[in-house]
Amino acid sequence: MNTLPGLIMSVCVLLLFTAYSLTKLIHLLSRHNPLIAQAELQNFYTSEYVANFEEIDFKIAWGVEGYHDRISRDDEEFVYWDV
């Protein structure tokens, strides 16, 4: 009987999750309130803000690998280096 409390809690969590999901689905389908997630900081940056990547020394790197063989592709046929 040690699993009975776990079973009850699992069913309760499943019911709560289902109820929440159904209310969000009903809101979306009825177009009552299509907002699912809400931003905490509204209009944090204005449209006049321009990010200067050289000023903040922003750098990005990524790798390219084959889809089937997962081997890194770093020859000129596959990769164009723009430094």
Image: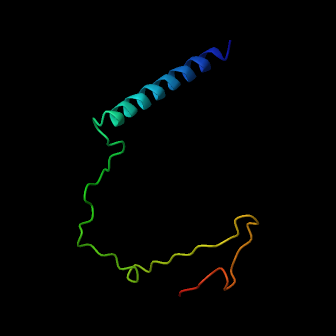
Examine the rendered structure and indicate whether residue 9 appears above or below residue 70.
above
Examine the rendered structure and indicate whether residue 24 appears above or below residue 2.
below
Residue drawn at point x = 29 percent, y = 37 percent: 31
Q: Horizontal placement of 20 versus 76: left or right?
A: left
Residue 53 quadrant: bottom left
Residue drawn at point x = 38 percent, y = 33 percent: 24
Depth check: give the residue in front, 78 or 38: 78
Could you say where residue 7 lies in the image, as x and y percent from the top left? Answer: 61, 19
Depth check: give the residue in front, 25 or 62: 25
Q: Horizontal placement of 30 versus 2: left or right?
A: left
Residue drawn at point x = 43 percent, y = 25 percent: 19
Examine the rendered structure and indicate whether residue 60 appears above or below residue 11.
below
Residue 56 quadrant: bottom left
Colour mode of the rendering:
rainbow
Depth check: give the residue in front, 36 or 53: 36
Q: Quadrant of the N terminus?
A: top right
Could you say where residue 73 lies in the image, as x and y percent from the top left? Answer: 70, 76
Q: Horizontal placement of 29 versus 71: left or right?
A: left
Q: How many marks?
A: 0
Q: Horizontal placement of 11 versus 22: left or right?
A: right
Residue drawn at point x = 27 percent, y = 35 percent: 32
| Residue farthest toward the right in the current orientation of the protein | 69
Could you say where residue 47 lies in the image, as x and y percent from the top left? Answer: 24, 69
Residue 79 quadrant: bottom right
